[in-house]
Amino acid sequence: MKTETDIKSQLREWISSASKKGGKVAISDDTPIIEQRIITSLQVMDLILYIEQLTDGSVDVESLKPGAFRDVNTIYKNFFEASNDN
Amino acid sequence: MSDMSAIVEKLCRASEREYYNPYESFVWPESLDMNEWYTSPQFISIYGTPEYDAISDGERRRLSFFEAVNFFSLNIHGEKALIEGLAKRLYAKDSRPVSAYLHHFLDEENKHMIYFGGFCTRYAGKIYPDRKVVFDREYAPGEEDFLFFAKVMIFEEIVDYYNVKMGVDEGLNAVTRQINMLHHRDEARHLVFGRKVVADLFEKFSPNWSAETLAGVRQYIESYLLTTWKEYYNPPVYKDAGLKDAYELQKSAMNHPSCRAHRAEVSKACLKFLCDHGILTSVPVL
């Protein structure tokens, strides 16, 4: 099972590569990725697909609260923490 | 009578003539035969790739069923958002001249979801979920309306290309052929309306947008085109069809030259419209 460090590293790598800001954008775990337009609203769909791949599950978009994808820490907490704690 | 009024009048008369009851249009079989085709082979998302070539005829037919469920699911999600946006604009100040047709548009989109949802729930027990998330933001004057109708038009143009071909494909299961045919019959009118509205809104509002807004609109439209296409390459579909490495398969198919050529061909008319009207300045790679 992947550790929290591993998962957050993969998320940072994905977000950095997907960013249209040019080149590889360096982000930290609390960088507000939507607010700073590091990824766009349309790219969130790709991010959801990536989360589904990492969790081997599906994301219930209808139950998402505002800010669910705010930064890497928030993404980890919302989509990975529960299964990693078990 | 203005151009738009004449178009609205003509479309309303056609919708009234073609009015039908979706509950009486279909005879739903108790179950489906998985040895039939449910998506024409050339519209299966991985068609033309080595992975498609490697699977058996039976696996292709099984995949065609789940691809049909995905196609109908995408339509449901698109139509839900469309109905929400159209309802908001019904009798709004700027939309009053077209409200008579918006009633038909809303009615017909609801009917489409009845048979798309009917197929998916009866035979797959589910609809593949939507992954699109909407974020609130500020818009320049006219920008929100323009993007709403532009996205609808793009979505429907791609779908209609599939509907036209599959609606007459005698090799397909009869129910899916009928769904595609009926959908095209209504969508042909929606596309006439959509193209007129998109062209008019762009002509009216874009001259007053800043260079930054216009560049943002163009980038958004290009991204939306690609995002729409990505939904046709859905890993859970591959998993349900029993194919391995579903996420890698999705990436591989998206990047395969055959699939790129397919997307370019299907999108050609829509992209020509967008370029001819100055909405895009060049044809994007999809």
Image (cartoon, coloured by chain):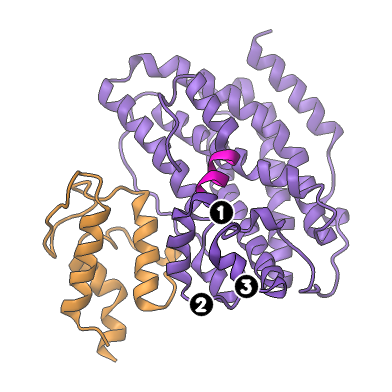
Q: Colour of chain B?
A: purple
Q: What secondary structure do most residues of the magenta stretch adopt?
A: helix
* Chain for disc number 2: B
- Classed neighbour count for the residue bearing mark 1: other residues with Cα under 10 Å, few (<14), some (14–19), many (≥20): some
Quarter-of-image position of residue A75: bottom left
Tag 1 and tag 3, C-beta contact below 8 Å: no
Marking on residue B244: 2
Task: State the residue at coordinates (62%, 52%).
Answer: B75
Query: In the rendered structure, which amino acid carries the disc numbered 3?
Result: Ile
> Is disc 3 on the same chain as disc 1?
yes
Q: Is label 2 or label 1 in front?
A: 2
- Classed neighbour count for the residue bearing mark 2: other residues with Cα under 10 Å, few (<14), some (14–19), many (≥20): few
Q: Give the image location of residue B192, x and y in percent.
A: 67, 27
The residue labelled by disc 1 is B77
Quarter-of-image position of residue A80: bottom left
Quadrant location, the N terminus of chain B: top right
* Chain for disc number 3: B
- CA–CA distance in space, label 2 to label 1: 27 Å
Task: State the residue at coordinates (79%, 46%).
Answer: B182
Outermost residue to the top: B1
Task: State the residue at coordinates (50%, 33%).
Answer: B150
Q: Helix, strand, or loop for circle 2?
A: loop
